[in-house]
């Protein structure tokens, strides 16, 4: 029995040494075969994890300008305020103030600038929510009369505005907003992009910009679920749930009513 115990103890010690050797050698070999070296070299921190100069203003400004312009072709009964140009004019003034505050790079922020940005997003959301509610109520009650073409065009305008509005909210709140992301103050993202999980597939200067959030919003509104971008925080999951719900209701009612009219 003592001899057997010594033999078993020696076997265990040999296994422990082999395991330690495997932990040292095998991961390095697998890493070198499975992942190509990062373009920036070993030890380079991706841009989304470190302070940067900030993203360009034109993407967000252009999308907001489109959302403002899309309010003009809506029927008058779907518009929140009258005359119809009043609310878009106010939104345009807020957008102009934001562009003047950060004309090229979004890297400077104050409480006033932050408040202006959130107010603009809230006004766009309120106007589109009113249009959705009025459209759905009219279709359900049968009080609004549309031709098939007019109904599809109106539903498409509202759906596209919804995509831009939610993209703006995602962009404004992910890791504290564009300025906070440029400063690298929050290491925990609210949305997980593919480049974050596979940094060797992206250049070292990659970081999410408004175009990435617009794509996220579009795919969520079209597929009614996340595609390649995953929500991590609770508010992100609830926001994507709300957007998908609005999209489902809008598309289902508009298409069903249009088909019924065509028949």
Image (cartoon, helix red, strand yellow):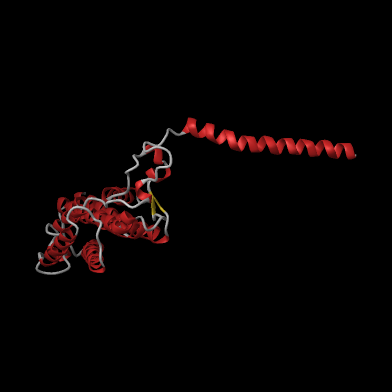
Q: Quadrant of residue 2?
A: top right
Closest to the observer, 251 or 67: 67
Closest to the observer, 254 or 240: 240
Closest to the observer, 120 or 164: 120
Outermost residue to the right: 1
Residue 126, position as x, y percentages in the image: 23, 66
Would residue 204 be found to the left or right of residue 43 on screen? Answer: left
Q: Name the residue at 37% across, 36% down.
A: 39
| In the rendered image, the vertical position of residue 20 relative to residue 139, given as above or below | above
| In the rendered image, the vertical position of residue 24 relative to residue 259, given as above or below | above
Q: Quadrant of the N terminus?
A: top right
Would residue 190 be found to the left or right of residue 78 on screen? Answer: right
Residue 142, position as x, y percentages in the image: 22, 63
Residue 77, position as x, y percentages in the image: 15, 65
Q: Name the residue at 39% across, 61% down.
A: 235
Would residue 17 be found to the left or right of residue 23 on screen? Answer: right
Closest to the observer, 48 or 191: 48
So how many labels did they put on this image?
0
Q: Name the residue at 58% across, 33% down.
A: 25
Residue 34, position as x, y percentages in the image: 48, 32
Q: Name the residue at 22% across, 65% down.
A: 113
């Amino acid at each position: 029995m003592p001899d057997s115990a010594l033999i078993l103890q020696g076997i265990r010690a040999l296994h422990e040494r082999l395991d330690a050797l495997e932990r040292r050698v095998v991961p390095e070999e697998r890493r070198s075969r499975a992942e190509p070296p990062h373009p920036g070299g070993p030890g380079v921190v991706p841009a989304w994890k470190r302070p940067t100069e900030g993203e360009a203003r034109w993407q967000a400004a252009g999308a907001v300008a489109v959302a403002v312009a899309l309010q003009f072709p809506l029927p008058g009964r779907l518009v929140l305020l009258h005359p119809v140009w009043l609310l878009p004019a106010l939104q345009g003034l807020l957008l102009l103030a934001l562009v003047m505050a950060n004309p090229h790079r979004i890297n400077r922020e104050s409480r006033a600038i932050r408040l202006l940005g959130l107010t603009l997003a809230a006004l766009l959301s309120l106007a589109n929510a009113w249009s959705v509610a009025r459209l759905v109520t009219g279709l359900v009650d049968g009080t609004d009369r549309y031709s098939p073409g007019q109904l599809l065009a109106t539903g498409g305008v509202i759906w596209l505005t919804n995509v831009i509005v939610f993209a703006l909210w995602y962009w404004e709140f992910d890791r504290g907003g564009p300025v906070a992301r440029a400063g690298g103050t929050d290491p925990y993202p609210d949305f997980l992009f593919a480049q974050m999980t596979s940094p060797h597939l992206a250049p070292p200067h990659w970081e999410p910009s408004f175009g990435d959030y617009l794509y996220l919003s579009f795919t969520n509104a079209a597929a009614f679920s996340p595609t390649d971008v995953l929500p991590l925080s609770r508010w992100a999951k609830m926001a994507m749930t709300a957007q998908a719900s609005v999209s489902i209701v809008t598309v289902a009612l508009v298409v069903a009513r249009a088909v019924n009219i065509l028949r």
